[in-house]
Image (spheres, grey):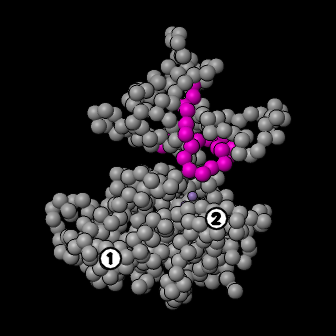
């Protein structure tokens, strides 16, 4: 089967639009290095297009109708945007759902200690990482510290050129004879990922003077007390910005393409709708996907169906039965990245069914392991309808699977939404070096994802 390279089809106008999308995505990614920052960024963009807070609409009992646009902010860590269409919600809605949490290193609740005149922050890694990737590289600290009085202190350290960065040390090669003989999974242990925070003693301090210096800086510069770390969410992420990748600038190297590239593409697609859609469209950005979608902001929480109930109620069209019908009638793209074929690791893929960088947005039925376990295994009828929508809208797309059979697997939010009985398939941008600190995507695939998601929201039925 012929799978064209998307770049061959672009004229000047398309190339210009592609660069514009890349530029806007870079800004979104650079300003969104945590799920919280992504929510803030998405809501900022949506508000400019007339989206209002559903919570306010509920409070004011404001009736909703075709053309209205609402957003739902789930604890600042997940977000949903709805553009209400012409048909009743009972007919189902078109959902593009992604996740905005990415693998990282989280600071523990009692993190700080001193050893041999270095002050450290103890950590617990988040999501599936190769731990040896995260040593010997500059890290930035992003997050919030919540005080007992309700104050929330936002922290971003290490992104400005004048900021200091932090990081995790690595054993010199000269002394690594024994270490190099270990399995890669054992070279750096989870408890070895402690971050060096300070290296200079506080004058006049006898007991743990370097840790005292650290606490003094936190107090003076951020009003953070050591006890406040108990109610903090500080994430260590790769410091620095997204970069053009390749001499031809065809790709992007960035932190958190998984899955912020799909989140951004779905957001841009929703914002690009110039007319009210036939069916209500929803752009959903979930948290906690990388750790199993648990927790109040993960997809397993019921915020999506609660939002649907609230919207139906404000449209004067709510009943428990109508809600259940609406959920089951939805069409969804679970927008998540897929593994791009990597010639250097060809043995991990089955080439003719792998996604190629530059060949467009991919559709993925199998993400699991052990005989399709955990896969969406979408219905052939649904895929046929999607093929039609994609081809009618000149989208460059391809199919994908997550590696050779029995090599491994992964999960997405697809199976959780499928529990409602809706049609769902994974669809996303192929990525090289997925879950490494710096991941690679092709700009053409981002551009095609925006086109695909817009076409899906407009035309899927
Ligand atoms: Mn993902
Ligand atoms: Mn992932």
Residue in front for this viewpoint, 186 or 83: 186
Q: Which residue is mark 2?
A: 369
Dot 1 or dot 2, earlier in sequence: 1
Quadrant where the N terminus is found in the figure: bottom right
Image position, residue 50 (x, y; %): 29, 68
In this orientation, does residue 99 appear?
yes
Image position, residue 170 (x, y; %): 71, 35
Image quarter for ligand 2 equals: bottom right
Q: Check residue 111 for magenta coloring.
A: no
Quadrant of residue 403 in the image?
Answer: bottom right
Q: Is residue 121 left or right of residue 436?
A: left
Quadrant of residue 158 in the image?
Answer: top right
* Residue 326 numbered mark, or none: 1
**Residue visible at 26% across and 63% down?**
54
Residue in front for this viewpoint, 276 or 48: 276
Question: Which residues fall within the magenta stretch?
Answer: 119-142
Q: Is residue 384 above or below residue 368?
A: below
């Amino acid at each position: 089967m012929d799978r064209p390279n998307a770049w061959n089809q672009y004229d000047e106008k398309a190339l210009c639009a592609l660069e514009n999308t890349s530029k806007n995505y870079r800004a979104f990614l650079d300003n969104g290095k945590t799920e919280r920052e992504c929510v803030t960024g998405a809501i900022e963009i949506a508000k400019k297009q007339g989206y209002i807070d559903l919570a306010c609409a509920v409070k004011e009992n404001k009736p909703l109708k075709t053309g209205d646009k609402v957003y739902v902010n789930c604890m600042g860590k997940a977000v949903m945007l709805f553009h209400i269409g012409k048909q009743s919600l009972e007919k189902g809605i078109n959902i593009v759902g992604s996740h905005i949490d990415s693998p990282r290193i989280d600071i523990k609740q009692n993190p700080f200690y001193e050893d041999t005149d270095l002050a450290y922050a103890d950590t617990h890694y988040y999501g599936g990482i190769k731990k040896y990737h995260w040593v010997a590289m500059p890290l930035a600290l992003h997050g919030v510290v919540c005080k007992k009085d309700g104050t929330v202190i936002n922290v971003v350290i290490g992104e400005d050129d004048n900021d200091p960065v932090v990081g995790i040390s690595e054993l010199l090669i000269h002394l690594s004879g024994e270490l190099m003989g270990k399995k890669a999974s054992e070279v750096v242990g989870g408890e070895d990922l402690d971050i060096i925070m300070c290296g200079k003693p506080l004058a006049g301090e006898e007991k743990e003077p370097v840790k005292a210096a650290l606490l003094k800086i936190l107090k003076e510069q951020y009003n953070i007390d050591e006890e406040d770390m108990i109610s903090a969410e500080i994430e260590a992420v790769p410091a620095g910005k997204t970069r053009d990748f390749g001499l031809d600038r065809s790709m992007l190297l960035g932190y958190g393409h998984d899955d912020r590239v799909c989140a951004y593409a779905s957001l841009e697609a929703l914002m690009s709708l110039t007319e009210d859609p036939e069916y209500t469209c929803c752009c959903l950005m979930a948290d906690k996907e990388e750790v199993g979608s648990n927790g109040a902001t993960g997809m397993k929480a019921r915020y999506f169906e609660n939002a649907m109930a609230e919207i139906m109620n404000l449209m004067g069209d709510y009943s428990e039965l109508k809600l259940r019908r609406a959920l089951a009638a939805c069409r969804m793209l679970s927008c998540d990245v897929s593994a791009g074929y990597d010639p250097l690791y060809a043995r991990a893929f089955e080439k003719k069914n792998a996604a190629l960088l530059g060949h467009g947005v991919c559709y993925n039925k199998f993400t699991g392991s052990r005989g399709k376990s955990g896969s969406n295994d979408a219905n052939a009828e649904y895929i046929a309808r999607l093929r039609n929508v994609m081809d009618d809208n000149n989208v460059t797309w391809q199919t994908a699977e997550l590696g050779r059979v029995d090599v491994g697997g992964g999960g997405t939010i697809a199976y959780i939404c499928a529990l409602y009985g809706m049609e769902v398939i994974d669809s996303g941008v192929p990525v090289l070096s997925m879950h490494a600190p710096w991941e690679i995507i092709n700009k053409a695939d981002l551009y095609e994802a925006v086109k695909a998601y817009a076409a899906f929201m407009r035309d899927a039925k």
